[in-house]
Every structure is written in C-alpha cells, then in structure tokens.
Image (tube, helix red, strand yellow):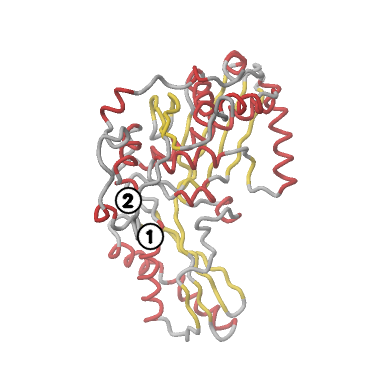
C-alpha cells in the first residue's frame, strides 16, 4: 500500500490555536469586510484544509521545511502529496530557482491597412521609455518590462509585459496597460479604427503555447536526486520503473495534445490556490509544465520540473482574508517580499505530487490508494 493515513501530519491542535480563522473560532466576515472580493455575498463555501509535508526546500528564496496547507474534498490527495514531500525531504530537499517573471496584457488596435499598422508599430516600439514612465506613475509595484507586437494585416496586438512585485498582478497590469493605451490613443498620429484593452492573447486563465514557451507569473525550475533507497521505501517503486513509466506518460501527453508533460499538477495547485487566496481560475495556466525523470549512473532517480506559469502572490486579492492569510502564514509566505518564496514552494508541491502519482501508476497502486482513502467506509 503506497499511501496510508500514517503519512499524514499529526493532528495540528497547536496550529489551530495559533490560527483562529482556520479553527473556526472567529465568525465569518461581514459583507463590508469582503468588499473588493465578492459581490452579492450570501455566505461562505467551506472547503476542508489539510496539512501536507513537511517539504524540505533548498531554493533561492524558499529554504527549510514547510508544512503546506491544501484545501480539497478529494480523499487521498493530501496523503499522496505528503508522500511525495517525504521522499523529497528524505533526499535532502529540492533545489529551486526563479527563472523568469512577467505578467501580460494584450490590447488590440485596428487601422485602415497594413502600411498604417506598420507605421504605428514602429512608433509604439519607440515609446518604450514613455510606457515605463507611465507604469511608474500608475503603480507603486508594477514595472514595465517590454512590449511585443503581433501584426495581423491591418491590426496589431501589443503584448505588454510587466513585473508585479509580490502580487499575482492581473488587475495591476490591466490598469497600467489601460493608462499606456490612453497615452497611445492621445498621441499616436495614425487613425485607430478599433481598440480593445484585451484581445485574448495574454494567456490569462488559459493554457497556451505562448506562456508555455516564455513566462506568465513566475517561471520556476526545480530538481531533486532521490536515492534508490528512498524511492523503494517511500515511493514503493524503483528509479528504473519510474523512468519507464515517465516515458510512457510523455507519449500519452503527446498523443492527447497536452501542453507540457505532467500527470496532475492541477490537483495540488487548485488545493494550494484555494487555501492561500490565489486566483483559482489561474490553475488553467499554472498547471502547464514539464516533469522529467532519469535514472542516474549511480542508480538513483533524478527528477526535475519546469513550471513557466506560476501566477501566485503573497499580497493582494484573496490573501488578506482570514483563513487564506493564516494558510500563507503557516508557510511564512504572507506579505511583502514573500511571493518568490511562495512560487518556489508551489513548484515543490507540484513536483511532490508528480513523484507520488507516477510511482503509484508505475507500480499499479493507483486504484488501491483511491479505494482506501478516496471513499467513505461502506460507501
């Protein structure tokens, strides 16, 4: 049996005392407290939160052991992720780095013909310093990074890219882009026939090839070498078996047209996002990634993950709400200066979940685990 209740953390009574919102000791917020987060408020949808881990990280920003709150109604999920985290921790921790950062908004401009579009693009590219200045005046945290034109006949999409500090940043980049576009509409010499603030080309809340190749949010690389004895004792498999199944799964991803190669990153991301006040709809883009497994010459298992679209924040949005803030505080990921740390932990969660499920599938334990932990007794 690869996953059992004994792999779960002990009952966190001390943790409950320190986090009264999660423990249900503080009443639900009043409607005025939720202004900016919800309209037509009628109540709270309560999703159980479990602790997975500990997860040992040796990242550039996330260093140490972390217990990770996951909000889910799927039995076996917390146990499975805990198993993967245990394997990583016993292997000395996962190394992680932020490879790139950027959040996009993609306004659309239409002109009379291609020649006019080309002149407009040349002018717009020359305005980069103005765009940078406008961004600085508009937001305390956003920084203009670049603009990339996509010309389509007599129209062009300008893909504006920003860094957004410690916020996930979708609203921030929308506001900054709007101010830039108002400057464009006021000062450009070409006649703009049509303008839209977003042309569906930014990748917002969609799995897409552009973000997969570049970045949306934070792009994180992560790796770990698991000793053979850890693979055998914790994951109940072998490096060779997991590598063989990893190849078969890669072919399956290719045949189904999946962006990336991964088994179920959306599971851990959705649970983490809901627990920690992230935009849950962004799981659609964040779940794109590549997992790679190799048997080393020494007979150990090398595992790496590349996640280009981890759009997470430690401030803003739902992070300020009671239980969400407490979940972030459990990982010391609430507030300014913590978003990169959160991104690296998020990558660790994804990698842990992949290791556990790939081992279960490689050894034929997948169904048994779900029958044991994913169903109520006598159901």
Contact between labelled residues 1 and 2, with CB atoms less than 8 Å apart: yes
Between residue 299 and residue 257, name the one nearer to us: 257
Few, some or many C-alpha atoms within 10 Å of disc 1 (few <14, some 14-19, many ≥20)? some
Image position of 25 with respect to 335: above or below: above
Q: Position of residue 250 (x, y in %)?
A: 70, 38
Q: Secondary structure at mark 2?
A: loop
Front position in the image: 128 or 14: 14
Q: Residues within 10 Å of mark 2 (few under 14, many from 20)?
A: some
The C terminus: image quadrant? top right
Image position of 154 with respect to 128: above or below: below
Disc 1 secondary structure class: helix
Q: CA distance from mark 2 to mark 1?
A: 10 Å
Q: Residue at x 49, y 27 (%)?
A: 94
The image shows residue 177 at horizontal and vertical percentages of: 40, 67
Find disc 1 in the rendering and name its residue: 171
Q: Work out which quarter of the rendered image holds the N terminus and state it.
A: top right
Mark 2 or mark 1: name the one nearer the start of the chain.
1
Residue at 43% in and 43% down: 274
**Which of 369 and 174 lies nearest the eye of the viewer?**
369
Direction front: furthest residue: 378
Task: Name the residue: 44% across, 39% down.
Answer: 272
Quadrant assignment, res 238? top right
Instruction: Decide: is 368 above or below 309.
Output: above
The answer to which of 10 and 129 lies nearer the viewer is 10
Residue at horizontal 33 percent and vertical 32 percent from the top: 330
**Residue 357 versus residue 273 in the image, above or below:** above
Task: Give residue 316's mark.
Answer: 2
x, y percent for residue 37 = 34, 55
Drawn side of residue 347 relative to residue 130, left or right: right
Numbered mark located on residue 226 in the image: none
User: Along the horizontal axis of the image, is 373 left or right of 252?
Assistant: left
């Amino acid at each position: 049996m690869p996953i059992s209740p004994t792999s779960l953390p002990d009952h966190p009574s001390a943790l409950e005392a320190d986090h009264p919102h999660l423990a249900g000791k503080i009443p639900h917020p009043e409607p005025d407290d939720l202004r900016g987060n919800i309209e037509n408020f009628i109540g709270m949808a309560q999703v159980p939160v479990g602790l997975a881990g500990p997860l040992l990280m040796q990242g550039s920003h996330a260093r140490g052991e972390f217990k990770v709150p996951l909000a889910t109604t799927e039995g076996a999920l917390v146990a499975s992720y805990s198993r993967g985290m245990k394997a990583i921790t016993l292997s000395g921790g996962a190394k992680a780095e932020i490879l790139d950062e950027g959040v996009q908004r993609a306004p659309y401009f239409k002109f009379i013909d291609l020649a006019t579009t080309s002149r407009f693009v040349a002018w717009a590219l020359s305005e980069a310093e103005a765009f940078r200045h406008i961004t600085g005046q508009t937001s305390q945290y956003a920084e203009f990074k670049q603009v990339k034109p996509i010309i389509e006949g007599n129209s062009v999409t300008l893909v504006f890219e920003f860094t957004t500090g410690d916020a996930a940043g979708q609203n921030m980049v929308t506001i900054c882009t709007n101010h830039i576009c108002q400057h464009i509409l006021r000062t450009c010499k070409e006649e703009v026939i049509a303008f839209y603030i977003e042309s569906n080309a930014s990748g917002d809340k969609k799995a897409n090839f552009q973000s997969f190749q570049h970045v949306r949010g934070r792009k994180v690389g992560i790796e770990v070498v698991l000793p053979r004895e850890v693979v055998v004792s914790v994951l109940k498999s072998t490096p060779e078996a997991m590598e063989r199944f990893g190849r078969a799964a890669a072919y399956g991803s290719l045949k189904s047209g999946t962006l990336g190669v991964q088994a179920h990153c959306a599971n851990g991301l959705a649970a983490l996002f809901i627990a920690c006040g992230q935009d849950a709809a962004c799981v659609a883009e964040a779940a794109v990634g590549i997992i790679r497994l190799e048997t080393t010459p020494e007979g150990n298992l090398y595992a790496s993950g590349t996640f280009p679209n981890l759009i997470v924040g430690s401030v803003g949005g739902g992070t300020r709400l009671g239980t969400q803030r407490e979940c972030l505080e459990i990982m010391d990921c609430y507030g300014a200066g913590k978003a990169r740390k959160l991104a690296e932990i998020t990558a660790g969660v994804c990698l842990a979940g992949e290791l556990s499920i790939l081992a279960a599938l490689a050894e034929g334990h997948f169904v048994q685990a779900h029958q044991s932990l994913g169903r109520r007794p006598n159901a």
